Each structure stands twice: as structure tokens, then as C-alpha cells.
Image (cartoon, grey):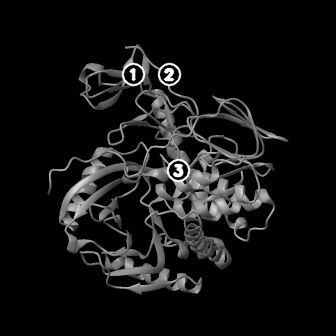
Amino acid sequence: MADIPTQHVSYWIDSTPETGYSALLGDLEVDVAVVGAGIVGLTTALLLKRAGRSVAVLESRKIVDQVTGRTTAKLTSLHGLIYTHLIKYFGEAGARAYAESNQAAIEIVDTIRTQLHCECDFERLPAYTVTESKEWVPALETEAETAAKLGLPVDFVTETSLPFPVVGAVRFDHQARFHPRKYLLSVAEAVNGDGCGVYENTRVLDVEEGTPCRVLTDRGKVTARDVVIATNIPILDKGAFFAKVFPRQHVVLGIRVAPEQVPDGMFLSVGEPRYSVRVHPTAEGPLLIVSGQGYRTGHADTAQKSRELRWFVQNRFRVTSVNYEWINQDYDSADRVPYIGRLTPGSSHLYTATGFNAWGLSNGTVAATIISDQIIGNHNRWADLYRAARVNVKASGRRLLKENAQVAEMWLKDKLTSDYRKTVETIPPGEGETVDLHGKKSAVYRDEDGRVHAVSAVCTHLGCTLRWNRVDKSWDCPCHGSRFDTEGVVISGPARKNLEPESW
């Protein structure tokens, strides 16, 4: 394997220029304020601008730099074994709505990128759900039969272009891969201007729903008739989405392999081992984007997950280099359908989208169409399935109880634990540990130059103790997925407040 250093950044971010949109400068009045600049926020803003609304997109850091900037970038309606589940818990009408909306999302992205003359490496490819275990074959056959009844472009096959054998696969034709950041940077350019604006480094602190709504930021106040919270998980606790969606991470590698081993398509496994594989064209040759087994945020040693994924790729491919490594994070909904629409049953002008179950590019585009239709006043035939305020006890009750019981147990355990064996002196360069500093739980990071960075280890959302992420070098909340950098600045919510610095 070539001695090429691994860059700890997503390929999508590394291969595109840094953005330079200005921060909000004082107060502003628009028709719609959109909080968050990933695929949901920017696509919603574009659709609303085209409908004649003035829109302000507010991003706390840089646009397309977090969840959407760290995706594996599959644009597909093939989401594992989702359709068998949907038939069981949402009926054929619900399953059909999910199938139609996600298949339509591919066409929407294709149309938008064509209209914007966006060169984003868009290419039609088949997508596969594969297994190497015979015990999963009946489930795959059932999924293929179900998807066919719903009108999806599906076949069951026993061979793929992967350089290792599988025993069965569900194949969806006419799916797509693309460069999500190239695409969304073009969308942002189309949004910005003519009475609309994209604002970076503008952190939203609170939203007051009313007539009109008021969005309070660290740079000024935005007054708007409607507000869209497009922050992966809502930064507002209204609706208690922090208890209805659950954070999940994956380690992702960008690798190069022997030319004859480059597969044609996009692949997701069921059973063991768990992996996702797809190829992206680059000037230096094909780059395989590979992710491994998902794990709940803050509940795993990310360095160990990285080693497991590297072991997998080296045992399935002739790897010539590992060029990129990063972590992506998404939220799973309790019933496997995203929450999209009005934030609460009583909300008239406040909207959200969350719980994409690692399928944010298609579901995020669906969310943008539903929310923009609701704001404009158009009927959307998919909206009822995704209703953000829905309660489906049959589909979600067991998982809601299990996940929230785990959070409660962890929160209580953290409150009762005060014995931290590590000391600042024992932390090696490039690593972080939770230690006891002057009777306080402190998150301490020693950088590569030996400087110590100490902040509170207590999440500013609901007070859980943070865990060190060794791959991304961040502090992650094991309860609801908030993430902070080594200086204590919020990377992503639901937390809105930075960590307090600590002296040592």
C-alpha cells in the first residue's frame, strides 16, 4: 500500500473551495428564515425563492460543512430493507408515498443541477442491498417483491460487480451518485441575491414563533413570517425531538484500490459484515467511499471503529492507499420515517425536518419539497406520511422506550460518577480525556504541540457528560448527539451554547 498520508477531512470538503459568505450584519426582515445550510435548508430556500419569497439562510459555521458535507453521497430510494418495514407499520399507502417521494427526489436533484448548469459529477448508477449470508436471502427476496409492487425499478440478483462474492442482492436501477457539496454550493449561489441572502458564522440562539416570528442570533434579529429549522436535529426543544430521534455515527474512508477491483454501482450490506461502498470519479482516478458499522454517538471508541473498517477494506480489496477518513452523523427516527413539517401540532409558521436514518440526500430533498409546499400553500401528497408531530406507537414505541431508558441510565450514572483516573499530565499529544479539575468534570485536550485546552465536560443541552472522539478530535454527547470542538464551540446541536473554558 502506498505511503500516502490519510487526511482527516471529508473528500467533499477537501475537493471544493472554502466558502466566504458574510455574517448577518444587524437586523433583517424577510418572508422566510431558514436555520441551517445543508441539503434541507438550501434546497428549501431555493424552492421558496423561485416561488417569489424572500429568504435568509442562517448558518452557525460554514455552509455544507457538517452532515451534508460528510455524507457518503448516495442519492437513492433504496434504503436497506425499508419497504417491508413500511408495509407492516404504515400500510401500502404509506410505503408507496415513501417510495414515490424518494424516487422523485433523484429527479428533483437532476432537474435542479441541470437548470443551474452545475458540474457535480452526477451519474446514474444502480444501487444494491447485498448480503454475504444465506440467512438474509429470504428477507432480500421479500424486499424485492415488495418494492416491485410499489413501482420501484427493482430486481433480485445473485451477482454484482463487487470484487468479492455475495449470495443475494436487491438491485434498484436508475439511481444516482453526485458530489453533494459541488451541487449545494451552486444552489447557495442561486439563493444568494435579489432580496435573499446566505449568512455564515451566524449562530441562532432562539426562535420566537408568532405573527411574525423572530429569530434571535448572535449577529442580530431576523423577523420572518415563517421559519424553517433545518439543523439535522432541531435546536429548539419544542416537540421533544431529542427524545424521538437518536444520533448515529459512521467512520468513512476514502480509498484507492487496484483498477480491476473498482465496482460499478452503490452498495449497502445487511447482516455481517456491515458496510457501504460506492465509487466517485476524481482527477487522480476512482475513489472508493466506504463506511462501516454504525454506532450510537459517544458510545464507541472511534479509533477502534476506524481500525475495524480498515481491516474490512484490506480484506475485501487490494488497497493502494487510504486517502481520507472522517465521521458522519445522522439521526434515526424511532419508526424509520423522517419527521417533516410543522414543528408541533400548534405551530403555524415553524417547520422542521429530522430523523433521516442516514438517507439525508433523498429524504432531505423530499423535506424541502414538503416544507416549501406547506409555506406556499400548495398541497403535497406525501406530507401526511412524514408529519413531524405524528405518533405511531406500533412502529416506534419499543425503540422509544429502549433508547430513552439508556439515556436516562447514562445521565444518572454520570451524575453519580466523580472518580476519573486520568490526569492532565497523562494525556498524550493529540488526545483528549475527561478529568476532574478542581472538583469539576472537565474535557481536556492536549494538542500536537503539547498545549492543553480545557473546557467543561458537561453538555450545555441537558447536562450529559461528553465523550472524546479520537477520529474527529471533538467532544460528543452520548445522550442526544451534540458535538463541540476542542475549544468548546458548538459544532452541531441540539446544544446552542458553547462549553465554558476551565483553568487547570
Neighbours of disc 2 within 10 Å: few (<14), some (14-19), many (20+): some
CB under 8 Å between callouts 3 and 2? no
Q: Residue at x 30, y 27 (%)?
A: 447
Sequence-first disc among 3 and 2: 3
- Residue topped by disc 2: 500
CA distance for labels 1 and 2? 9 Å
- Residue at x 25%, y 78% (from the top left corner): 165
Lower sequence index among marks 3 and 1 = 3
On screen, residue 6 above or below 462: below
Above or below for 112 versus 355: below
Q: Position of residue 227 (x, y in %)?
A: 73, 46
User: Which residue is at the far right?
Assistant: 211
Question: Which residue is more in the foreground, 256 or 281?
Answer: 281
Identify residue for label 1.
454
- In the rendered structure, the answer to whether residue 59 lies left or right of residue 213 reads left
Q: Residue at x 56, y 66 (%)?
A: 109
Q: Which residue is mark 3?
A: 246
Question: Which amino acid type is shown beneath numbered disc 1?
Answer: Ala
Mark 3–mark 1 distance (CA, rounded to whole Å): 28 Å
Q: Tag 2 or tag 1, which sits nearer the N-term?
A: 1
